[in-house]
Each structure stands twice: as C-alpha cells, then as structure tokens.
C-alpha cells in the first residue's frame, strides 16, 4: 500500500512551516521601518548639504539633531505601531551564534588594531568606522532559511549590501571619493535593506483571511 | 478450490497524531515552537486563519494540553497569548519523527516498486561488420 504513496507528497520536516519559523525567529529584525528613518535622514542630509553648500560641520550637527529626534519620537511610536499591526512575540528561539557576526567583528577589530599600529590609517578612521554596520548586515547572510524565493532574495540583498558597505569605505584609500558619497552609499544600502525587511514582514504576516481548515 | 490469498505483512506504518497533523493546528504549533509566547494578532497574521477559525483551533490545542493560553489586560484591551506546553513540544517533535519515518518508508517502497516494474533489458546482438 505504501508503494502508491509518493515520498515527496508527504510533508518534509525541514520544509513545512520553514517560512513561519523564519518569520517568527526574525520578527524583530524584520521590523525595518524602525531604523529606516535614520538612514533616510542621513541620506537626505548628505544630498542636501552639498546642494545648498552647507558646511560639513553644520551638516553633521543637523544629522545628529535629526538622529536624536528620530530616536526620541520615531522609535517608541514605530514599536507601538508594529505591536498594534503585527502583534508581539516573546523570546524568539535564539539563533545559533551566527558566523556572519563573528566575521564582521573580526573585520572591525582587525581594522582597529591595524589603524592603531599604522598611524597613516588615522585620517581614514572616520570613514572606515562605517564598517561597524557590518555587524548588522553580515549575520542575515549566514542564517539558514527555508527554500523560499523571498527569503533567498533577502539573503542575496544582504550579501550584496555587505559587500557594498565593505568596499565603499575601503575605496577611500585609493579612489578618494567625497565623504558625502561614501555616507550616501552606505545609508542608501541600509535603507534599501530595511525597506525590503519591512516588505518581507508585511508579505508573510499581512492578514489575508484564508480558510485553510475548520476541522 | 482456489488457493488462499497470502498477504505478506508490510512494514509498520508510524502513527500520526491527528491533533497535530491538521494543517492549521500544525501552523500554530510551528510558530509557537519558534518562540516562548505569541499573541493572537501575530498568530492570525502568520497562519492566515480567520479569527473564528484561529480561536477554535487554539481551544482544541488547549483542550489537548498542547498549548497554554493566557489572557491579560493591557490598556483596557484583552491580550490573548499562547505558548507551547512541554507536552506540546514533545508531541510536535514526535510528529516530525513519525513523518520522517513515514517519508523514508514511502521512499523505500517507491524505489522497490520502480525496480520491480522496470523491464528487463535484453542485450542486442551487434550486426556483423562486413570485412573486405
């Protein structure tokens, strides 16, 4: 009798609910709109500052004020908004220590030790400090995920984003681009990643009343 | 007189827990297995069940002792949260083990059936090559 069953027709323990598990475990990280305004403000300032010939000092001041305002107003409001619209979960199952985070910390630590040893690195320290954001962008590249095209796309985007964030500040050493260009490239990448995260969360959690069973 | 039909006993089919096997309940249990506790709204969005259906399934799971439902009041609103019990976690793990065993069994049986149904290849004689 079993010969008429197809093994593929039975649910695979690794596949079913893979998306559900992924969304639950990454629920907090997928709340992209919480951080998106920080990158949007940063992008706006570095685009507007050269256009209106605002000095670097004033641009920096504006950015810091914008960041504080966003942190004070936007963060609590967006937290409540996500809670109201998508619900809450308590203590998602902890992830295994992500390899990406270790790699990111190693890159960053290596740079700091390097810049301490070689004083010629010092002028670039401010720009290369942008590598700190690799601690956010690298881990999602290594998280195991279900074979879903949208989750694979997330991983691909994070991989491309991490590569951009790694190479753009590094290019300061030999291409000497303006700091505005470097910051806008990094901010733009982070903004894109955060917007995709929010879209993914909405895609998987948007309540569409589908009756799958009423047993 | 006809010969009695001999049925060879097949491999034992693993038992599947029907409470867990139902897709809506399996989805709820999968979500709860990935966190400590989840609220009704999150479960509704994740499982894409209607409120009524989700409520019914949660009650069934609670009756089966697989989940624990807690109702609290937060800013004059009732917040319903659910968590997997120890039995629920055990039942889910056992369900996936049974399903894995069933898959393996079905795979073996399919391979056997395919081998049995494969036609025997008779080697063909090569045509003689004319030599000059």
Image (spheres, coloured by chain):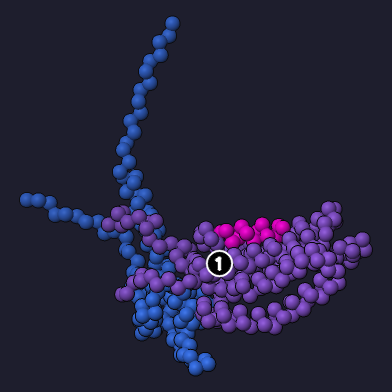
For chain B, give the colour: blue
Using the rendered view, name the quadrant where residue A29 is placed. bottom right
Res. B131 in view: yes
**x 61%, y 57%: residue:** A156
Q: Give the residue at mark 1.
A: A199
Q: Which residues are magenta?
A: A152-165
Identify whether A3 is placed above or below A57.
above
Q: Position of residue A121 (x, y in %)?
A: 89, 62
Task: Looking at the picture, tell me which residue is in the foreground, A184 or A144.
Answer: A184
Disc 1 on helix, strand or loop? helix
Q: Is residue B30 above or below residue A114?
A: below
Q: Quadrant of the C terminus of chain A?
A: bottom left
Which residue sits furthest top?
B132
Residue B85 falls inside the magenta stretch: no
Instruction: Indicate whether residue A159 is drawn in magenta.
Output: yes
* Count of labels in the image: 1
In the rendered image, the residue lying farthest to the front is A52
Q: Can you give x and y, in whole percent of width and height, for residue A106 in the image?
A: 76, 65
Tell me which chain appears purple: A
Q: Is residue A55 left or right of residue A34?
A: right
Viewer-proximal residue among A42 and B87: A42
Left or right of A213, for residue B30: right
Residue at 70% of width from left, 73% of height from top? A38
Q: Chain of mark 1?
A: A
Dominant SS in magenta: helix
Q: Residue at x 64, y 61 (%)?
A: A158
Q: Nearer the viewer, residue B57 or A59?
A: A59
| Residue A128 in the image, given as x and y percentages of width and height | 81, 64
């Amino acid at each position: 009798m079993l010969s008429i069953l197809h093994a593929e027709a039975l649910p695979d323990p690794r596949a079913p609910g893979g998306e559900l598990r992924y969304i639950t475990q990454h629920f907090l990280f997928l709340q992209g709109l919480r951080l998106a305004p920080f990158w949007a403000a940063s992008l706006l300032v570095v685009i507007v500052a050269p256009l209106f010939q605002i000095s670097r000092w004033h641009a920096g001041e504006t950015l810091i004020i914008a960041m504080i305002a966003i942190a004070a107003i936007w963060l609590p409001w967006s937290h409540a908004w996500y809670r109201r619209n998508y619900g809450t979960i308590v203590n998602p199952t902890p992830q295994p220590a992500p390899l990406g985070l270790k790699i990111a910390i190693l890159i960053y630590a290596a740079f700091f030790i390097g810049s301490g040893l070689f004083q010629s690195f010092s002028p670039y320290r401010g720009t290369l400090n942008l590598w700190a954001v690799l601690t956010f962008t690298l881990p999602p590249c290594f998280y195991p995920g279900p074979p879903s095209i949208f989750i694979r796309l997330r991983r691909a985007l994070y991989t491309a984003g991490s590569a951009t964030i790694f190479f753009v500040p590094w290019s300061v050493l030999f291409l000497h681009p303006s700091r505005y260009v470097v910051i806008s490239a990094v901010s733009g990448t982070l903004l894109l990643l955060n917007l995709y995260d929010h879209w993914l969360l909405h895609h998987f959690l948007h309540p569409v009343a589908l009756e799958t069973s009423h047993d | 007189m006809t010969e009695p039909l001999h049925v060879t006993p097949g491999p034992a089919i693993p038992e599947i827990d029907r409470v867990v096997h139902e897709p809506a309940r399996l989805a709820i249990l999968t979500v709860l297995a990935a966190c400590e506790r989840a609220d009704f709204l999150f479960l509704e969005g994740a499982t894409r069940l209607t409120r009524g259906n989700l409520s019914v399934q949660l009650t069934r799971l609670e009756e089966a002792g697989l989940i624990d439902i807690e109702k609290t009041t937060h800013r004059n609103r009732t917040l319903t949260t659910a968590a997997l019990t120890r039995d629920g976690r055990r039942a889910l793990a056992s369900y996936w083990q049974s399903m894995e065993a069933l898959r393996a069994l079905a795979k073996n049986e399919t391979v056997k059936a395919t081998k049995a149904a494969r036609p025997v290849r008779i080697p063909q004689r090569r045509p003689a090559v004319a030599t000059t």
